[in-house]
Amino acid sequence: MAEVQKLTERKLRESDRRMTPQRQAVLKALVDLSDEHPTAEEVYQVARQYCSTVGMATVYRSLELFVQMGIINKAPTLDGTTKYELSKEPHDHFVCLKCGRTYEVNVGEKPKENEELAKEGFKVLNVSTVYFGYCSDCLSEK
Amino acid sequence: MAEVQKLTERKLRESDRRMTPQRQAVLKALVDLSDEHPTAEEVYQVARQYCSTVGMATVYRSLELFVQMGIINKAPTLDGTTKYELSKEPHDHFVCLKCGRTYEVNVGEKPKENEELAKEGFKVLNVSTVYFGYCSDCLSEK
DNA sequence: GTGATTGCAAAGGTTTTGCAGTAAC
DNA sequence: GTTACTGCAAAACCTTTGCAATCAC
């Protein structure tokens, strides 16, 4: 996954920004946590393992920067926090209303919808579908 | 739209709760703002026109209650605030990355996706698709 | 009357910002 | 050497909570 790091470094240079140990640490944390959907706090905890002096403010600033650069995506949650994840092929989320876990799911394509929206004058850059309900774990507990 | 109010009143009684002027004011505000996707603050501003003494805390408590009762839906946004809207037929949202406006759009059905998820053990109660991109207004400004 | 509901103010949690010092280029 | 970047602490922001007073039933 040094792939993401090189991409980031290149994009940083292109926009006259700098690669710092802190940004590397945040990036590594995001890679480590790529199976979760970490909050800023969770990224911070892991990033400190790579750069013990990194501050929360820097984590937030890095995350915001990476979002603007298209390296990661931002996903607001119903509990008011924001989760982050490395950008990848479009995929959807399932949020369990009981345990709160977020699952990545991949169902269906949406080219038809994008075409429809284009006809109405919208330019679609990204699509995110969130399904709300109960996951199998919670259903079996009932 | 007194329809929503009666429904709410009935549901309140059923759960041994009370209809108060404050809750009515919040409900009226939600109806007035049904074409927007108001934040709690916006609901508060309008609700005060109907009940001048209503407090922010009550607005939040009412909104949370209505969400639990299924009267309204809660939608977190990328800027960290939460928006509310009266529950209605499932529909999708388009968020313009430039002006930030949220549009309601209605493209495609998702029965197939729901079936797929059911096979994987998920019970889907609600679906929300958000399209991100540029709206026609902003595109024409460019 | 009784218990749910309210308003206020204070607390809570997350995210942002100002600024002097530091480090990448 | 410049200029972007950092850490810290404080501020800003949205939302929740404790509690005595009030109101719906």
Image (cartoon, coloured by chain):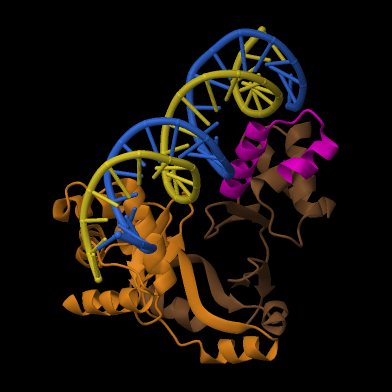
Chain colours: A brown, B orange, C blue, D yellow
| Residue B38 part of the magenta-drawn span | no
Residue C6 x, y percent position in the rendering:
28, 51
Seen at 20% across and 46% down, the residue is B53
| Residue B142 seen anywhere in this rendered image of the structure | no
Residue B131 x, y percent position in the rendering:
47, 68
Q: Nearer the viewer, residue A112 or A59?
A: A59
Residue B71 sits in quarter? bottom left
Tag count in the figure?
0
Q: Nearer the viewer, residue A20 or A101?
A: A101
Left or right of A75 in this view: B34: left
Q: Nearer the viewer, residue A92 or B67?
A: B67
Residue B3 sits in quarter? bottom left
Seen at 64% across and 86% down, the residue is B117
Residue range (magenta): A43-69
Q: Nearer the viewer, residue A110 or B120?
A: B120
The vertical placement of A36 against C25, above or below, is below
Residue B66 x, y percent position in the rendering:
37, 67
Left or right of C22 in this view: B83: left
The vertical placement of C4 against A61, above or below, is below
Residue A129 x, y percent position in the rendering:
54, 72
Residue A74 sits in quarter? bottom right
| Residue B122 seen anywhere in this rendered image of the structure | yes
Left or right of B28 in this view: B109: right
Q: Main secondary structure of the magenta part?
A: helix
| Residue A51 part of the magenta-drawn span | yes
Seen at 44% across and 70% down, the residue is B68
Which quarter of the rendered picture does the N terminus of chain B lie within? bottom left
